[in-house]
Amino acid sequence: MQYVPFGKLNFRVSRLGFGTMRLPRIEGEDNKIDRERAIALIRKGIDGGISYVDTAYGYHAGESEIVTGLALKDGYREKVTLTTKLPHWSVNEEKDMNRLLDEQLKKLDVPYLDFYILHALNRDAYEKMSAFNYKPFLEQALKDGRIRHTGFSFHDDKETFLHILNDWDKWEMAQIQHNYLDDENQATEEGLREAGRQGVSIVVMEPLRGGALANPPSDVRAMIDEHESKRSPVDWAFRYLADYPEVATILSGMSTEEQLEDNLRIFNNLTVNGMTEADRAFTKALKEKYLARQPIGCTACQYCQPCPQGVKIPNIFGAYNHAQMFDHPEEFADRYARMKEKGEDGSQCIGCGACETACPQQLNIREWLEKIESEQK
Ligand code: SF4
Ligand code: SF4
C-alpha cells in the first residue's frame, strides 16, 4: 500500500480509503448491516494497510457510524484517520450542529474525529450552512478538541466548488466525485488542481461511478481486454486517480472480501505519476468510447422546459443516455416506469413542437420521445 502526505497536514494516509456506505447487509433486510461480517471486513482492510475510514450520519440509515465505531475498537481506531460528515439537511437551527456532532461522537464511541466535514454541499446547502454560521461552529469544535480537521464533500458545479474553496481559508480537505468519465463534471479536474494548489487535499468518492466503471459495456471492455497491459477495468479507474498528486485517498465502498482483496492487490501496485502519456491517452479514449454510446445530444440545458404536458424531457433523455452508456436498459425501464407514474413520460406528449423550437441542439425531441416510448411498451 502506498501512503501519501495529506496535503498541508502533517500525516500520511493510505491511497485506498474504506468507504462504509455499502457494508455487507443481511439478506432480505434492506439496509440492515450484517455487523459481524462488516466489522471483520473493515478490520481486514485495516490489517491489509488501509489507514483511512470514511462514514457519514446517514449511511445505512444511520447504522454505519455505529458499526464503524465497533469495527474500530480493540486498537483499530489508533490505526486510522477517521472521517464523518455533518448532514446539512438535519440542521434546522444553529445549535443542531453541536447536537449532531455530539451524537455522532457517541455513535462512533470516540472522543474525537480526525475529520468532520460538511456533507454533500451544493450552492443552496452552502448558503444555508453559511447562514447558520458553520465557521464559528467548526472553529469551536477544533478548539475544544472534538475534531482535528475540517473539510467538505461536494456535489455541484466547478464555480460553486471554487466559491466554497475560496470562501474559507481553514478547509483542509475536499471530498469530490472524480473518475476518468467525470473529469469535466462537478468540481472538475480544474477544481481538483486548484484545491491542491491551496494545500487542500482531495478525497475521491465514486472512483468507479457507483460501480459502473467496473462492469463496462462490451465495446469498452473489448478495448480494455485488448490493451497490452491486461489491466482490469477497476485497475484502470484507480490508476487514473492515483496519478494525481493532489489526491490523498480514494474511497471505495466495499461490500465483500473479494472486492477488498482485489482493491488491495491493485493499490499495492499503484504509484503517483505512474501513468505514462500513452496510459493517459488510453483513459481519454475510454471516456470518448463511453460518451459516444450516448445517442441523444441533450445537454440538459432545460430550455425545453416546462412542457405544457409536463413531459420531463431532459430527465428522460439523461436517463436514456446514461442507460445506453453503461448498457443498463433495465435501469432505464425502472426510471421510466416511475416517470410514467408521475405523468412525466413521453406518452403525455401531444406533439405541439414547442420544445423543438426552444432546443438549441435542434434535437428531434418528438421522434426521440416516440422511439423511447415504443421501446418501453
Ligand atoms: S412536443 Fe410534446 S414534449 Fe414537446 S413541448 Fe409539446 S407536448 Fe411537450
Ligand atoms: S432544450 Fe434540448 S438540449 Fe436542452 S434540455 Fe431540452 S432537449 Fe436537452
Image (spheres, grey):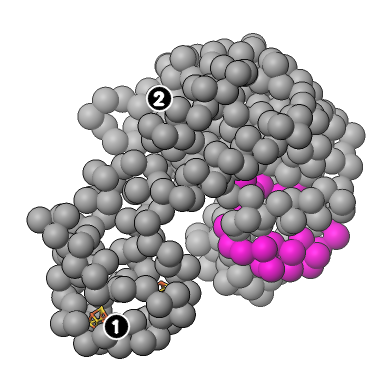
Q: Is mark 1 within 8 Å of ligand 1?
A: yes
CA gap between label 1 and label 2 equals 43 Å
Q: Quadrant of residue 311?
A: bottom left
Segment tinted magenta in the rendering:
154-179
Mark 1: few, some, or many residues within 10 Å (few <14, many ≥20)?
some
Label 1 residue SS: loop
Question: Of helix, strand and loop, which one carries label 2?
Answer: loop
Residue marked by disc 1: 307
Closest to the observer: 143 or 296? 296
Q: Quadrant of residue 43?
A: top right
Q: Amino acid at mark 1?
A: Cys
- Residue at (74% x, 56% y) in the render: 190
State which quarter of the image contains the C terminus: bottom left
Residue that mark 2 sits on: 24
Queried whether the magenta region covers residue 325, the answer comes back as: no
Residue 140 % position (x, y) = 78, 56
Q: Position of residue 234 (x, y in %)?
A: 54, 27
Ligand 2 resides in the quarter of the picture at bottom left
Q: Give the mark nearest the N terminus, 1 or 2.
A: 2
In the displayed structure, 232 sits above or below 374; it is above
Is 319 drawn above or below residue 255 in the view shown? below
